Amino acid sequence: MRENTIGMPSLPGQRRKPSDMIEQSRIISLFYLFKPLIPRRMQIHLRRRIVAKKRRTSSRTWPIDVAAATPVNNWSGWPDQKKFAVILTHDVDTPRGHTRCLQLADLEKNLGFRSAFYFVPRRYDVSLGLREYLLSGGFEIGVHGLYHDGLLYKSREIFRERALHINRYLKEWQAVGFRSPSMHHNLDWLHDLEVEYDASTFDTDPFEPQPDGVRTIFPFWVNGETTRGGYVELPYTLAQDFTLFILMQNRNIDIWKHKLDWIADQGGMALILTHPDYMNFDGSAPGFEEYPSRLYEDLLLYIKDRYRNEYWHALPKEVARFWTACVVDKR
């Protein structure tokens, strides 16, 4: 059994070397410095080649890292003795994604699901009407960075300054959850945010810019210092849609199903991260950076039909509050 606390990103209970963090920050900064100079199609082609190479060398830890199945201390199971948990989340990266949120929410609602949408407050106008529609329908809203420009973690000073604005949006939107753009993370710095949970990590994903997986398919608690409270960390545990369908160009959901079945067997948390930006809802031939929304719908139907009455379907904030009350407070 592993401890359900962590101080820094990476493996629960471990700390990354400061030198490693500085080097990682430099690499990320260089990437975003030159990114605007590279045409989008070329970026995707380059990333496809990199992903193909990494996939060959990561077969032992992706899509499944067996070490991630170790439960935490004080773990007695999910509410109502459910076998595993299912959490749906969406990052809305662009204005295009913003225009498709209603279609995605209606797709989920028609199948009996609800989810969390994370918006970038200063990259596009986040519609008040959309926020009200989602909240009134039982969905959740969270904050997804500030600009989505890759600079949030460039320095401690930048993060502190932006955290002030992020906290204002959290309060204005009545949101309690945050996810960093591009899954960048520094779990110590995130204490600056007034949140109940963060969702900027993953169990295993060698294809991310900051590929240090936390190697658990369960939530965990991130300790605060004397002047800062802790929060729950919710790693995503199913591969991102962008990775599967845009970079790997898969045309089925076999990887999703395989990982979901494994998580269910382990009694873990199936937390899914998708993007309305890349979903094609009109049935036409998908564009260069699109995939048919029916693939996501197929996943929901698979969950609903194969695991009927066996899973706890919850919003991220509900999982965080359950974890705080039933696991953390019983330490």
Image (spheres, helix red, strand yellow):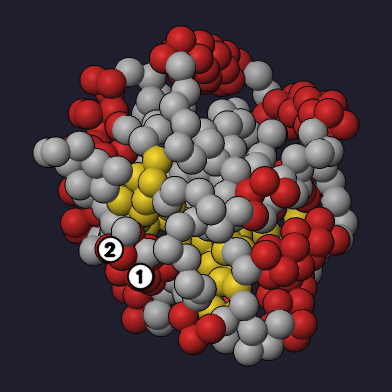
Left or right side of 200 for 142: left
Question: If the image is split into quadrants, where does the C terminus sit?
Answer: bottom left
Label at residue 326: 1
Q: Quadrant of residue 164?
A: top left
Kind of residue sitting beneath label 2: Asp
Q: Residue at x 69, y 34 (%)?
A: 207
Q: Are marks 1 and 2 in contact (CB under 8 Å)?
A: yes
Using the rendered image of the protein, determine whether residue 40 is visible from the camera's viewpoint: yes
Q: Secondary structure at mark 1?
A: helix
Between residue 268 and residue 273, name the one nearer to us. 268
Rendering coords of residue 22 (x, y %): 44, 12
Kind of residue sitting beneath label 1: Cys
Q: Residue at x 46, y 10 (%)?
A: 19
Rendering coords of residue 20 (x, y %): 50, 14
Rendering coords of residue 190 (x, y %): 31, 38
Q: Secondary structure at mark 2?
A: helix
- Work out which residue is located at the far left of the displayed protein and give it: 227
Label at residue 329: 2
